[in-house]
Amino acid sequence: MKPKFVLLAIVLLALYLVGQKLAWDSQRYDYVNNYMNRYTSAKMRKVLTAGHDALLADLAMIRGIQFYGMNYPLFDKKPTMYNQFKSLADATIDMDPRHFEAYRFWGFAMTSAQRGKVDAYRFLMAGAHRMAATDEVFTIIQPNMWEVAKDAAYVAEYELQKATKEWGCDAYTFAEKARDCPEFLHRLKVLACRDVDPDPIPALQELATRANQSGNVAIWQLNLDHMRRIISEEHKRFWDAASQAYYEIHGASPTRIEQLTKNVGILKKAVQEYQKVSSEWAEGGVGQLYPNMVNPLPEKKGKLEFRIAQIPELPEDPYGGEYLILDLQGKPSLVGTGINELERESFLEPINQTLKEYQKDHNGECPEDLDAFSQEYNLRLPVADGFGYPLLLDYGKCEFYFPPVSEENPPPLPPYGEEKKTADEEIDLTLMEDDSADSSPASATDEVKAGTADSDG
Amino acid sequence: MAVLKTENLTKIFKKGWKEAKVALDGLSIEVQEGEIFGFLGPNGAGKTTTIKILLRLLKPTSGRAEILDKDLATAPTRLRVGYMPENPYFYRFLTGEEFLQFYAKLNHIPSNQRKKRIDELIETVGMNHARNVRIRDYSKGMVQRIGLAQALMHDPKLVLLDEPLSGLDPIGRKEIRDLVYALKEQGRTIFFCSHILSDVQDICDRVAILHLGKLLKLGSLSELLGTEKDRVEVELKMPEGTTKESLGIQGDFHNGIFKTMLDNTEQANQFLDQWKSKGAVVRALIPQRKSLEELFVETIRAQDPKVALET
Amino acid sequence: MIEILTIGLNTFREAIRSKVLYLILFFMVLMIGSSFFLETLALDGGDRLIKNLGLSTISFFGLLVAMFIGVNLIPQEVESKTIYTIVSQGVQRWQFVLGKFLGLILTVYVNIALMTVMLLGILLYYFATTDMIEGVTFFWMIKAIFMELLAMLIVVAVAILFSSFSTPILSAVMTGCVYIIGQMTNDFWDYIRLQSEKQGTEIYCAFLKVIYYLCPHLDMLNLKKQVVHFEELGAAAASFPYGAGAFHAITYTAVILFIACLAFSKRDF
Ligand SMILES: Nc1ncnc2c1ncn2[C@@H]1O[C@H](COP(=O)(O)OP(=O)(O)OP(=O)(O)O)[C@@H](O)[C@H]1O
Ligand SMILES: [Mg+2]
């Protein structure tokens, strides 16, 4: 080879490398992200998709899920990562403002970052508002909007720990606008608005169902993490209650777990139960007081099993109810959280008030047609209470009531009632099944009618 | 009766804003029914341009062109003329037979006659062996042949052939030439463009010579060549000591043998008498008829002495 | 008529024997097929992704065929000199253009039919495996694909128009541009409205409006969003301007083809 040629080759190679280096240096600055954020408006992005915006929203979401799976442990350490993740979320919903799955995914995913929790709430609420917005094209509120609003409420209650008291209540209230909003959300709303600790079971059940339904590992993990956080919140309450009981007896706070297990009678069995469960699930079989109620080492993509607690003997408790703990086997039994009673009242109060108004307007008559009644007063009649007892109308007193809670007379409806088909064979209760039973309009009127007939006779 | 006529046909191609290329400059020709008309000219003379105007693929800048007694400025495009373009490559994805099928359908040939007609044509152009081969895989000559078949599909009165012999082997050339002759026998008129002159010479009744868009010569072969029929080529072995200067006329002188061209027989006789007496021996005496090729070169040289021609 | 049909069928035959078509079809089938796998990556809305990806693919397919095959049809005939022989054998130039259009649209439709079968098959399988048969979804898919077919008329006609007087590359670019602009005329109109509220923009707005009226309204034929959100669209979806859209597609195509025939008849070779 001629030396000139070699020289030329070397010079070219050097120039090439310098060029590559320059390009690399500037590439490290995330152009795409900046471009998305600064130089395009939402409208612009949508226009550029040339009519394929819905598809691009889907693809952006898949990218988002991948990004989450790879980077979420870094969200707190590297703020730019979180920012990129969030801007991807914004881009996605710009392209399809009613992208249901996108809201739910990003809503929970953002909570993985400490700084993303408020963002998550706002994002979800914005989504709920968009899905409820109507214009000449979208004429009705999206029927599944409630799920997004409900997620916002979960974030407010569990992630933000009720830092802003109204947020949970606001979110649940907004969720009620949706057509498909299920019964249990009304209960949660009442509790949230009264600032009572919520029943975690529906939320956990639902998250487990969602994790089990998705074939995607990242999504599975996301739901699992959220369940863990809810559970640890429950544990904390358990510990607080136990400490308080200990304090009442000993006049001092407990310093060690053993102190609780030895001295607080009502907690003893519960703690033992916890330890038994956790020793089975935890690595090495060591018992802990704060086990994960969810198996911490489940198979990837394995089914999450969710079981409702078998309650140990509990003579007294600070809330006048019973605690929820894990049960290794068996079907759910008739137990409440102490909150159900409260909830029954909260249901009855407004509807009985409306009933009075009705009597005033109609010469003291009691309504014959409950459908017409609820429509006239724009009222939602609950199908059942938190136990599963149906709502009944006493024509004599002209008053709504729920049957008394007792073992002899078990509730006919879920959550604690026998389900017609699957109660025995399926241990994990899926929320979806509850919903369909709860919110099917045909069964709702039937039950109420049946109730009225009973009281007539 | 004229089946094809142009009057003062001019075509100027505009290139950009200012530049213009004169492709045809006042061309007037007339082709009579039943003749084979040779349309000659070097590359870029404007032969293809003329055909395109006749087929209404191009609009003339000025002048008139008539084909089958229809004025092209007003007649509809429906012409029904057989045309074989130069260097075609057609639908490469079709087989020869499918290709002809397509033209048969375009020409409304009823489906029961189609097969027969196609067989006939394939036989005529000698493509029976390749009828089911895709045109993509044809050789150049095969494409020419199938192109010719296509041009004859609708039994046209007038056939325009643009360099039909280019790319054919000697046997193919002869076959096509015979075919063209046969077409004439069937009463068709043939307009034959070429720059391969020896082909034209044998079959054309009349020729036109075109250069840079201008018509240089037009007439029957005997008209164009006949006047210069009696030239004689003389070859003599000269006696020893003769020099080229002493000969007094132009010619080749080599190894004592002199070769020259003399314009008529009288000149030849004079010259021979003069040198025979000096002891020269006649080796050959050949009467010469001027070839079309020479005429072509001569005509074009006369018009434009600088042009480089490959003959 | 026989001429148009013959040329159309020949064009169709040419297209289905070309490798480009199969390359495009291969990628499109891959895309539709991938929705099947992407669905596992997305959340529970896999059905949504299949629908979106399928419809977008069909739309893209038409565009790509128009851009890569359609714009070449006429220039190719000129290059291979077949156009000379066809015209010399008594075929009118407008018949030639219409024949080319017919052949291309036939190619597009046949392939879209294939993709539709595949798409609906995947949807059916998806529903079967997830226990959620939704007949209404199929109804909406068919409707959306039908509108897509109408949109294809416009796209193909535009490709033929440009290729009847310009080079293939330019035609492909122009066809792509018309497709993009056509998809966003609605947003474009919003922009014009915003502009017209400002002072002293009359001439600019008039100019924009001219462009607006010249463009095809492909977004009138775009039912993709309706398919995904059909549930909450309710009455609005039923009152989607199907008739107006179809009318627009057919008349626009007719006008474009008319211009194409005219341009092609005036053209020198
Ligand atoms: N479309 C066109 N645009 C510009 N100039 C053209 C065009 N077609 C032909 N020409 C010019 O017109 C002249 C005549 O071309 P034409 O093709 O008629 O020649 P020809 O006699 O057929 O030559 P050949 O023997 O090489 O086929 C050429 O100089 C050519 O450059
Ligand atoms: Mg030529």
Image (spheres, coloured by chain):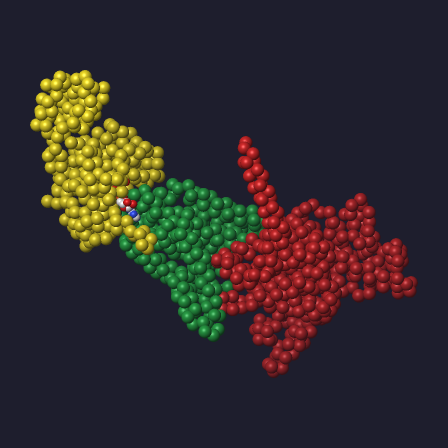
Chain colours: A red, B yellow, C green
Considering depth in this image, is C218 or A390 the residue closer to the camera? C218
- Horizontally, is C250 left or right of A3 in the view? left
- Horizontally, is A31 left or right of C52 in the view? right
Q: Does the rendering let one see residue A396? A: no
Quarter-of-image position of residue B164: top left
Residue C70 drawn at (x, y percent):
38, 49
Quarter-of-image position of residue C154: bottom left
Residue B135 drawn at (x, y percent):
32, 36
**What residue appears at the point 32 percent right and 55 percent down from the top-left corner?**
B17
Residue B50 drawn at (x, y percent):
22, 46
Quarter-of-image position of residue B238: top left
**What residue appears at the point 46 percent right and 68 percent down from the top-left corner?**
C192
**What residue appears at the point 59 percent right and 52 percent down from the top-left corner?**
A62
Considering depth in this image, is A337 or B166 the residue closer to the camera? B166
Please tell me whether residue B303 is drawn above or below residue C135 in the rendered image.
Answer: above
So how many labels did they put on this image? 0
Please tell me whether residue B282 is drawn above or below residue B217 in the rendered image.
Answer: above
Considering depth in this image, is B247 or A414 the residue closer to the camera? B247
- Horizontally, is C59 left or right of B120 in the view? right
**What residue appears at the point 69 percent right and 67 percent down from the top-left corner?**
A168
Q: Does the rendering let one see residue B215? A: yes
- Horizontally, is B223 left or right of A446 in the view? left
Residue B156 drawn at (x, y percent):
18, 42
Considering depth in this image, is B196 or B126 the residue closer to the camera? B196
